[in-house]
Image (cartoon, grey):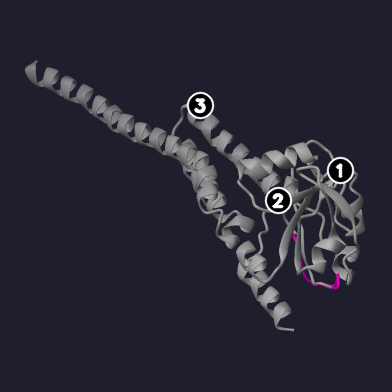
């Protein structure tokens, strides 16, 4: 009788041992998913902190490295962890990746240099008002020295 | 870079389609010591072939970012037209060009 009870209790203890193990494993993947999400969010400060490096500025490598790594982590976690919020996080991360691609390569794109811009040999003269309301003409500006004319987007 | 330009008697002129009021904010907020010209009617960006229709996030027309180095006779001796708004030119490149110009 005692042996059967012992056998019964020992059988019972095995499944709980298993669920403790799987409990640890799933909570690990949850953290992996959260880490992936945080990494995706860090893509923006990563890009901004390296924005003075011309290569990183125009390719966006720091941001995309973070996002891709974050998506990868979340994807792996979503496959191993059955909870739905983990799958939501993975989905969010991929949405972030798609958005970043569109923003960086789509919205930020400019039409290429035009023929006019590339073939001008003489700088057409013009007269415009500066920020103080004073009139400035290009011809009078370059008469006293070289002028670096910088066209920028504005709307900051 | 602008200091070098000023040393050789040069000048930096920035142009955008922002109205003077907005440009004034930009100058004071960033303590800029160069002028920002207002091309509100988009005439000059058309003249220079830099018109980007509906290029701004709000749909308004703005300039393709570009730089032109103009000598005393008004000739364009160097230019850089950006392919993407994040493009920034290396100041050393411009400085070298200015030095070349002054060596003539």
Mark 3 or mark 1, whichever is nearer to me: 1
Q: CA distance from mark 2 to mark 3?
A: 32 Å
Locate residue A32: give its quadrant: top left
Question: Whole-percent x and y of residue A71?
Answer: 53, 43
Q: Is residue A64 above or below residue B102?
A: above
Q: Magenta span covers which residues?
A: B73-82
Q: Secondary structure at mark 2?
A: helix
Locate residue B25: give its quadrant: top right
Mark 2 or mark 3, whichever is nearer to me: 2
Q: Secondary structure at mark 3?
A: helix
Q: CA distance from mark 2 to mark 1?
A: 27 Å
Residue wearing tag 1: B40
Q: Which numbered dot is residue A95?
A: none
| Tag 2–tag 3 contact (CB < 8 Å) | no
Q: Specify whether residue B34 is in view.
A: yes
Residue wearing tag 2: A105
* Residue at far left of view: A2
Question: Whole-percent x and y of residue A156?
Answer: 69, 41
Q: Chain of mark 1?
A: B
Residue at 76% x, 44% y is A131
Q: CA distance from mark 3 to mark 1?
A: 52 Å
Considering the image in quadrants, where does the N terminus of chain A appear? top left
Q: Is residue B76 magenta?
A: yes
Q: Which numbered dot is residue A84?
A: 3
Q: Nearer the viewer, residue A16 or A101?
A: A101
Please rate how many residues cluster around mark 1, counting C-alpha atoms within 10 Å: few if below 14, some from 14 to 19, many from 20: some
Question: Whole-percent x and y of residue B24?
Answer: 71, 41
* Residue at far bottom of view: B104
Question: Whole-percent x and y of residue B78?
Answer: 77, 72
Residue at 85% x, 43% y is B54
Q: Chain of mark 3?
A: A
Q: Secondary structure at mark 1?
A: loop
């Amino acid at each position: 009788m005692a042996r059967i009870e012992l056998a019964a209790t020992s059988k019972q203890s095995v499944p709980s041992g298993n669920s403790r193990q799987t409990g640890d494993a799933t909570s690990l993947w949850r953290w992996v998913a959260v880490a992936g999400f945080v990494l995706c969010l860090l893509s923006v400060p990563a890009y901004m902190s390296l924005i003075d490096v011309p290569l990183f500025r125009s390719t966006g490598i720091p941001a995309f490295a973070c996002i891709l790594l974050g998506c990868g982590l979340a994807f792996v976690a979503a496959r191993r962890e059955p909870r739905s919020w983990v799958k939501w996080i993975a989905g969010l991360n991929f949405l972030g990746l798609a958005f970043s691609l569109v923003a960086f390569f789509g919205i930020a794109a400019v039409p290429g240099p035009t023929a006019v811009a590339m073939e001008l040999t003489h700088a057409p003269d013009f007269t415009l008002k500066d920020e103080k309301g004073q009139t400035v003409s290009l011809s009078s500006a370059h008469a006293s020295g070289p002028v670096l004319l910088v066209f920028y987007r504005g709307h900051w | 870079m602008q200091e070098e330009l000023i040393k050789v008697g040069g000048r930096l002129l920035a142009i955008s389609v922002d109205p003077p009021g907005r440009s004034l904010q930009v100058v004071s907020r960033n303590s800029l010591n160069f002028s920002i010209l207002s091309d509100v009617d988009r005439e000059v960006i058309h003249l220079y072939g830099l018109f980007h229709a509906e290029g701004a996030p709000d749909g308004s027309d703005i300039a393709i970012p570009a730089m032109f180095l103009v000598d005393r006779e008004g000739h364009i001796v160097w230019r850089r037209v950006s392919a993407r708004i994040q493009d920034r030119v290396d100041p050393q490149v411009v400085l070298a060009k200015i030095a070349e110009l002054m060596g003539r």
